[in-house]
Image: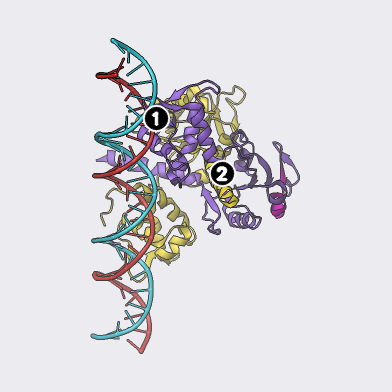
Chain colours: A purple, B yellow, C red, D cyan
Amino acid sequence: MAPLGRIPEATVARLPLYLRGLDAFPVGVTATVSSDELADLAGVNAAKVRKDLSHLGTYGTRGVGYDAAFLRFQISQALGVANVWPVVVCGMGNLGRALANHTGFTDRGFPVVAATDSDPDKIGTVVDGVPVHAPGELGDIVRRLGVAIGVISTPAEAAQGTADALVAAGVTSIMSFAPTVLSAPDEVEIRSVDLATELQILGFHLHRDRIAGDS
Amino acid sequence: MAPLGRIPEATVARLPLYLRGLDAFPVGVTATVSSDELADLAGVNAAKVRKDLSHLGTYGTRGVGYDAAFLRFQISQALGVANVWPVVVCGMGNLGRALANHTGFTDRGFPVVAATDSDPDKIGTVVDGVPVHAPGELGDIVRRLGVAIGVISTPAEAAQGTADALVAAGVTSIMSFAPTVLSAPDEVEIRSVDLATELQILGFHLHRDRIAGDS
DNA sequence: AGCCTCTTGTGAACTGATGCACAAGGTGTC
DNA sequence: GACACCTTGTGCATCAGTTCACAAGAGGCT
């Protein structure tokens, strides 16, 4: 309805899934997709799809469904997918290298334009097309290359310092893989992904199922 | 109160954070920690800490706080951290290799005992101490090594097939990095981490802030 | 045209999680 | 022993998100 009244966070988190689901429809071909189909493609239920999309506007046709191409355009619009946001990867360990080389980033408008690492042997080299700089140059890099997003894949001890440097350089969006809590001003958006934590959550359920089975 | 009345999902997701926060306290030393301190260490607020811990039991002392060592023990207990859950990594691309080599996994009771990949050049090799097998051997591997958790880091196209193979072999816990929806029986717990999606969510906020600044 | 079928959009109930505020219950001091 | 001071544990209000259920509207068939 309201073309852009505040979109709930939970909805924002699902829009990329819908966009991904719509990839199943070839471009240029006129096709309609129902909330039911889209729900399957995104792995959620149909009611949620409809409510989510209603936050963007009324783009569906009752009795028919949504025009796939048009819907894709609208979601892209809302997410700002047309923009390209350059990324810097801080910490070129195993994970950092994998991220710097991750094609899924560049493909979706998040090119990794530079990296930093504290290892003197790595500084000055180019890994998979990504130049590695010293951590002290972070501010320079951000300004020079217009970096919008910082990815932190350093050891936990170095994470807060890296975050501070990113913030000081004007970066307001950070994705962190370091297993630690980061503090930053409110206007900085931090998404923290701790892989070990994820496994521990799986472990909890395994553990409980085992106990339940013991009875 | 009830030592183990059903623990809310949101609480379960935070328990690993508390455990991580408690690492700040040296083992063997008697120390108390207040909900306020723990809240800082875990990056949440004090009220949440208290309510979360109250689901495990009443382990705190009013006027004092929680005994750090005892609390760590209790949370470990609840999470089943004492268990060791062997992990198999499916798909040894950039990300898979990084995960197989990730020390944070083994350290926390999730040793990567094997990997699979469809590339004939990789099959039979040992990468960072992890033997790489053919995807067809997955069932064997799971049974032989007692694998409890499967990590899917294959391309999206291969993800569902891999998940099916894991499920067929009896694995009930899956962490997937493939940008696609996986279907599996209800009793299988799937945690999906899509890195590009995470970046798109950050991108949304950047996009909106930019629009807001335009006015 | 009228009717039947289909799917959207949304009000409303419900569920789960969050945050407040405070009584309950400890510790240490005088 | 009484009092002052802490911090927990929790009842309650609030909020966000989910799900249901159905009226409104669009297309197609006879």
Q: Label 1 sits on what residue type?
A: Ser
**Residue identifier under label 1:** A35
Find numbered disc 1 in the image and state the secondary structure of the residue it sits on: helix
| Residue A36 seen by the camera | yes
Is residue A139 part of the magenta span, yes or no?
yes
- In this rendering, position of residue A10 left or right of residue C16: right
Specify the label residue B203 is tagged with.
2
Q: Nearer the viewer, mark 1 or mark 2?
A: 1
Circle 2 Cα neighbour tier, 10 Å, few/some/many (<14 / 14–19 / ≥20) = many
The answer to which of A97 and A209 lies nearer the viewer is A97
Q: What secondary structure is marked by label 2?
A: helix
- Figure quadrant of residue A50: top left
Left or right relative to B34: residue B90: right
Determine whether B134 is above or below A140 in the image: above
* Residue B34 coordinates in the image, percent (x, y): 40, 66
| Magenta range | A131-141
